Amino acid sequence: MSMHQSNARPLRLALSANGIFSLLTGASCVLAPMAIVSLVFAHPPVLFGIAAPTLITELGIGLLAFAALVFWTAGQSTVHRGRAKLITLLDIGWVLISAILLIAAPGLWTSSGVAIVIVVAVIVAAFALEQAFGLHLLYQGKSDVDAIRRGNQLALTAKAVTQASPERVWQVMSHQEAYADVADNISKVEVTKGSGSSLERRCYDNDGKSWNESCTLWDEGRAFAFRVHTEAPDYPYPISALSGEWSLSPVPDGTQIQMTFHVTAKSGLINALMFRLMAAPFSVICDRLLQRWIEIMEGTARPAHDDLALPGNGSAAQPV
């Protein structure tokens, strides 16, 4: 089974900015080493018999090579996690070495040199932080998961293909109570009212917190959707709007399952920061959910609910 990668844009942007800065800095060191020496050093150093201008030139060549590595990593169709982590660690190393040099050799620098070293270190630290955040958001898994964030809104789509028939997929997917058996963040689902388009359910998380949801779409054998009652006084999360749709469609290799979620965060800085981190764990949850569903649909895992057992008992699961 092929692996999918998504949510890579923040990491690519951070790497690209890092590459541009490294390229410009490296080119400056190679093209104007004497000017940089006179601007930065009060007492130009000699290290291992190598004069300061030569050191600056060699530093520039190293930065150009580093920029090439960064651009290569950012431009690949699939971002290599290991190289992105290495680049981030090298950035952190630059910041630490800059701090050590400023503290250990205060008389080495001009006032302009101190300011330049600090400014460059702050910029590099910002790249390291953004790359670390991008690595956190980066999703890679068996399902095709895509998360798009615009301001305080997040749209997440997760898709996977199973060899099971559409009838079998609908049987498993539409079983409301069994949703808790496959979703990491849900411990229990109760149907509280109705069926089909009038269905209402209550969901519980792993900490015992709960909320109500109402069905907004029921297309028998094809799709259903729910709206979460985020406006309720007892709703436990900093979300102002949340809806989800579950659907299936026949494909040449079997049946495609799709889940789509639209989330709007409440206002506030803390909520915005928490919301910014949601895409990564939510993507993993969706991947695991779809893959567990597929195992049940294809009979490679035993479902917790007996009425989802593979045909042989002649039963078909009902939504209520």
Image (spheres, rainbow, N blue to C red):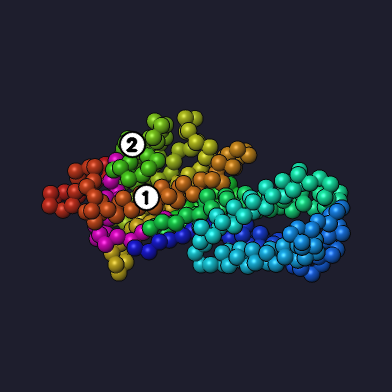
Mark 1 burial class by Cα count in 10 Å: few <14, some 14-19, many 20+: some
In the image, is residue 242 above or below residue 75? Answer: above
Does the rendering let one see residue 107?
Answer: yes
Based on the displayed image, in which of its 4 quarters is residue 319 positioned? Answer: top left
Q: Write the start and end of the magenta stretch as one range.
A: 158-177
Q: Give the residue number, with chain letter if any, for mark 2.
A: 188
Q: Secondary structure at mark 1?
A: helix
Q: Position of residue 216 (x, y in %)?
A: 40, 47
> What residue is disc 1 on?
288
Indicate the quadrant containing the N terminus: top left, top right, bottom left or bottom right: bottom left
> Tag 1: residue type?
Arg
* 112 sits to left or right of 61: right
- Horizontal relation, residue 141 to residue 279: left or right: left
The residue located at (45%, 51%) in the rendering is 283
- Residue 112 is at least partly visible in this image: no
259 inside magenta stretch: no
Q: Are marks 1 and 2 in contact (CB under 8 Å)?
A: no
> In x, y percent, where is residue 24?
74, 65
Which kind of residue does numbered mark 2 sit on?
Lys
Most extreme residue toward the front is 49
Q: Quadrant of the C terminus?
A: top left
Disc 2 secondary structure class: strand
Q: Is residue 49 above or below residue 274?
A: below
Separation of residues labelled 1 and 2 (CA atoms): 17 Å
Q: Is residue 125 above or below residue 249?
A: above
Q: Is residue 36 left or right of residue 313?
A: right
The answer to which of 310 and 220 lies nearer the viewer is 310
Residue 240, labelled with which disc?
none
The image quarter containing residue 255 is bottom left
Q: Residue 318 at what x, y percent from top left? A: 24, 46
